Amino acid sequence: MNLNHFFFEACAQVAAKHQIKTYVVGGWVRDQLLNRPSKDIDIVVEGNGMDFAQKVAQEIDTNIQVNFFKTFGTAQFNYKDYDYEFVGARKESYDHNSRKPVVENGTIQEDIARRDFTINALAISLNEADYGQIIDFHQGLAHLKEKRLVTPLDPNQTYSDDPLRMLRAIRFANQLEFKIEDESFKSIQNNANRIQIISQERIHTELNKILMCAKPSIGLDLLYKSKLMIHFLPELTWLHGVEEYKGKGHKDNFYHTLQVVDNIASMTDNLWLRWAALLHDIAKPQTKSYSEANGWSFHGHEVLGPKMAHKIFKNLKLPLDKPLEYVKKLIYLHLRPISLTKEIVTDSAVRRMVYEAGNDIDDLLILCRADITSKNEAKVSRYIQNLDALKIKIEEIEARDHIKNFQPPISGDVIIKTFQLKPGPEVGLIKNKIKDAILDGEIANEYQAAFDFMMRMRGL
Ligand code: ATP
Ligand code: MG
C-alpha cells in the first residue's frame, strides 16, 4: 500500500504530536487494494475530526480552506485534485423513520462496524506504533479476494437502518462485478419498500453510477430482481415480460432495453445518451397492439415516450433543462434512422431528420446502432451496413446544405420590411415556408435563393 504521500505524512505527524489515533478508512483503502483510481480519502480519528482536519491543513499549506459541518462533526477540504474528509470515530443507532442516526463518540472498531460492507470496512493505521498496517475486523480482505459483498453486521438490520445501502450494494456489485451474498440479497428483497425514505436525489445519484458502469445491465437487472426498481422507476419494470397471442410473442422489452444500454455503454460515456437508451422504448407497454396483418406493434411509442421521460425525470429530480430535452429528442427520433434505411430515401427526408436532430445527429445514430439487438447475424450486419450508408449520405448532404445548425436565411425583420407587415403569425408562416422549401430541396440554403422564393410565393 502506497502511503508515501505528503497527506498521509501530515496526518501521521499530527497524530503523533497530539497522541490521536488516526486511520484512513473506506473507499480509498478498498480501491487501492483493487488497483482502482480514487480521489477521495476518508480519515477517521478517535477524537475530534474537525480539529484534526484543521491541524492537518495547517501542516500541508496554510492557504487551505477547511469546510466544517458542525452538525455532523465532519470536516473536508480539497487540495491538488483530491477530496479529503475527516470524522471522529462514532457509534450510532437508528431511528426507524429516517436514515439519520443518533451518534455518539466511539472507537475505531465501533466506527468500522457501522459501515455498509466488509470491503468498505477496512482501515489502515497512520499511527506510529503500527503505521501502514491494515485493520480488518470483518474479513474484508478475504471478501475482496472472493469478490463478495457482505455486510459487517446482520444484513436485515444493516439495510433497514439505512436503506440507501441496498442501492449501494447493487451499485458496487455492478461497478466491481462482485456478488451480493444470497442472504444479503434476500434481506434487500425483504426491505425493498424501505427505499421510500430515501431522497430522489440520492436514488438518482446511485442510478447514474450504475448507468456509468461498463455493463449497466448487471445493476439494472439486480434493481429489478431486488424489487427496488418498482419504487422509483416503475415504468421500466412494466417493460418486463412477453405477451402471446395465437402463439406469437413479442420480444421482452426489458431485456432488450438492458442490452441496448450495454451496447451504448461500449460506445459512449455520455450519461444522458445512456439515459436515452434506457428510456427509448419506455412507452411500448402503453402502445402495444396485435393485428393479424402486422403481428405485434408499438405504434406511437416514440411520441408517448418523451412524455413519460419527462415524468420520470421529474419524479427522480433529474435535471429538467438540457439533459431532459436531449433525452426526449432522442427518444422521439430513435426510429427515424432505421426507417430511413428501409426504403429508397429522398434527400429531403434525410435533411428533415438532420434538421430535427441538429447537433445531436451523431448521438442519434449511436443510439440507433445500439438498438440493434437481433440474434440473427445476417440481419445485424445488414442493418449496420445500412446505417453506415445513411451516415455517408448525411455527411454529403450536410457538407452541401448545412442543415445541422440551420438558421433561417431570411430574418423576420427582412420579411417585415419587405412586405410592410406588423410582427405576428404571418411572419412565422412565411419563415416556415422558406424553411420547408430548403428542407425539401426546392431552393438552396442561402439568402438570395430564399429571397427570390419568398417574392415568387407572394406573386411578386
Ligand atoms: P464511492 O466514493 O465510489 O461512492 P465509497 O465506498 O468511497 O464509494 P463514499 O460515499 O465515498 O463511498 O463513502 C466512504 C465510506 O463511508 C464507504 O467506503 C463506507 O465505509 C462508508 N459509507 C458510505 N455510505 C455509507 C452508508 N450509507 N452506510 C454505511 N457506511 C457508509
Ligand atoms: Mg468515496
Image: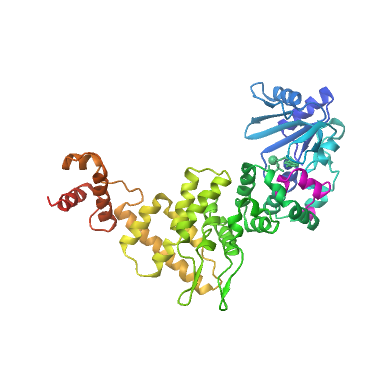
| Percent coordinates x, y for residue 431 in the rendering | 26, 48
Rendering coords of residue 98 (x, y %):
73, 39
Q: Which residues are magenta?
A: 145-166
Is residue 249 shown above or below 281?
Answer: below
To which quarter of the image does residue 249 belong? bottom right
Front residue of this view, candidates 400 and 295: 295
Measured as percent of width and height from the top left, residue 148 is found at: 77, 54
- Residue extending farthest right: 129
Q: Can the viewer see residue 341?
A: yes
Q: Nearer the viewer, residue 55 or 274?
A: 274
Q: Would you say residue 153 sits in the magenta stretch?
A: yes
**Does residue 320 sit above or below 395 in this rendering?**
above
Residue at figure coordinates x 39%, y 51% from the top left: 358
The one of 424 and 322 positioned closer to us in this rendering: 424
**What residue is rendered at 75% in x and 33% in y?**
43
Q: Nearer the viewer, residue 37 or 170?
A: 170
| Residue 6 point in image, percent of width and height | 71, 31
Q: Is residue 122 magenta?
A: no
Instruction: Name the residue at 40% across, 60% down.
Output: 391
Residue 35 shows up from this direction: no
Which residue sits at x=59%, y=57%? Answer: 236
User: Quadrant location of ligand 2?
Assistant: top right
Quadrant containing the N terminus is: top right
In the image, taking residue 305 as reference, residue 229 lies left or right, namely right
Above or below: residue 211 compared with residue 247: above
Question: Where 333 sits versus 47, above or below?
Answer: below
